[in-house]
Image (cartoon, helix red, strand yellow):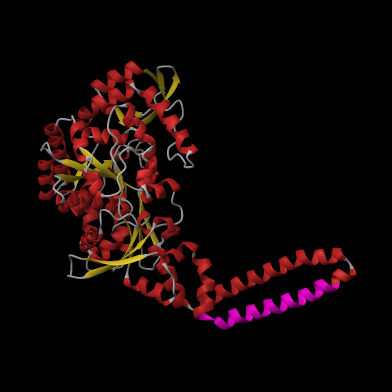
Amino acid sequence: MNDKGACPSPAFNQVMQTESIPFSMIPGQSRLFLDYLNDPESLRQFYPNAAGSVDEIRSFVPVALAAYRTDRAELCRALSAINQRFGCGTETEANIRRLALPDTVAVVTGQQAGLFTGPLYTIYKALSACRTAEALNDRGISAVPVFWIATEDHDFDEVSHAEAVDRSGSLSTAAIGLGENTPGKPVGNISLVSDAALVVGTFINDLPETQFTAELRDLLAYDWNKGQTIGMAFGTTLARILSRFGLILLDPMDSGLKRLASPLYVQAIENSDAIVTSLVKRGEQIINAGYHNQVLVTEDYFPLFWHTDFGVRSSLRKIRDGVYYSKDERREFTVADMANIADREPERFSPGVMLRPVVQDFLLPNVCYLGGGAEIAYFAQNSEVYRVLGRPVTPIFHRQSFTVVESRHARTLKEYDLGFIDLFNGFEELVPQIVERYISPETAELFRDVESKIDFELDRLGQALSGIDVTLADSLIKRRAKIAYHITTLQRKAYRAEIRRNEVIDRRIRSAMTELLPIGTLQERVLNFSEFYNKYGPNFFDWIYAAIDADQRDHQLIYL
């Protein structure tokens, strides 16, 4: 069942209504993710330090602190420089100073550096980390939130666009091109091309004009301009909108952090065979348990990427015992070669998805990681990397998940008796319900009457044909199915015509679906924060922060 509740909003002294929807009701969720949410304790085979609440995370604090060996002073010097470049606030600076203390732990999350910060779940991840750190502090644990900007990833297509709903109620997309940048470069190093200002201008001009539009335009135009790298633009925007919550930003491409990570790179390289063997075996165990592998690991896998002389992030593949090959550079390496390079030039390597969490926990005194459903699924695999490298497996916690329902859409759903889950059926499947109940019940009754009469007459005909020739009766059965199909098709066309004639209803339903379930998936996976900043300004982040319950495992509807 759905649970409704309320949470206070710090802005305008109002109370927001919320509604909880179990992820099991939302299509497309993996069974492993759902089982972890429901009973993490039952999956300790894959998640040795599984935690189901903030109180359970507390028990991992001594373990995380005991395993932490990185020089905190060097770490915080690097983080201070990174966050100053991004323009962080005093709250972030204070948290970096706290992180330098030996009893402070980190609550970590992260995401790729998407255009204008990417989909809303990037913001939800960041604020979830801030709220979880606050919950730990309330329990007497010194904790700070850290956001790992995945600048080393090289999937440009995934980060090159942002979406919002335009003036007409349609989905509008801003997109940047690769320009003269080399394909395969880490996205954090890719510079914005000359049309960046035009992209920002067009995107903002498509939005409805509000009291916050000029502020939003200035924010994005300042950060996302020609010559700026995507990593820098992303970090600057995130700092400007969220640093007041004390969020510490981390760019793993920073040379100081690379030096700190170097010993773990060397250890992972020297133990690469054991890592791969264990990952392959773990993949088989996951499949045998009835789940699926999030990341396919084959025998030629290598846990790190090589960065070529041309700045390309190149995968390394095993070609024979102890020898690996970079296709992009057409170069062979022995394990000893790579270990020596990682010691001298650690910036030439970056961790793959199976190793990255271990690097995060090596650099930071991480007490938990906040991730989405896919990340939770692949943590079941990479817990083996922790084991091979002799490190405790950090608990993973699901980040908060929201759909923002504005009042006009809430009225539409209520008026036409639609639940949020109903929207996943798609507009075409909702049309019959809306037409039959609210637009033209007489049309629906007419079709039912006609179908009943046709069925009656075809029954009579079938009985008569059976007495003449059984093959004729069999033929009628087949033709009857075709007749029913054509009647149903005609009915659907009539319903679509009816709803088109009622333009207001058609527009309201389509508008609700575009905003609440754009392109048929959760709002948070598509829309950019600009969608709501343009309407509500920075208050929007306060509302989201107030709605977060660190122990909440369901998807939340927030009614504005």
**Picture residue at 30% right of the left edge, 39% below the top:** 49
**Magenta part of the chain:** 439-464
- Furthest-bottom residue in view? 442
Residue 131: percent from the left, percent from the top?
21, 53
Q: Is residue 528 left or right of residue 138?
A: right
Question: Where 371 sits versus 447, above or below?
Answer: above
- Please identify the quadrant where the C terminus is shown: bottom left
Q: Residue furthest right?
A: 468
Q: Is residue 153 magenta?
A: no
Which of the 4 image quarters holds residue 393? top left
The answer to whether residue 229 shows anywhere in this view is no
The answer to whether residue 3 is above or below residue 314 is below
Q: How many marks?
A: 0
Q: Nearer the viewer, residue 173 or 390?
A: 390
Which residue is pictured at 42% across the width and 68% down the height? Answer: 419
Place of residue 464 in the rendered image (x, y in percent of width and height, measured from the top left): 85, 74
Give the image quarter of residue 312. top left
Residue 447 painted magenta: yes
Quadrant the N terminus occupies: bottom left
Q: Is residue 281 above or below residue 201?
A: above
Rendered view: 60 above or below 322? below
- What main secondary structure does the magenta stretch of the protein show? helix
Residue at 43% of width from left, 40% of height from top? 294
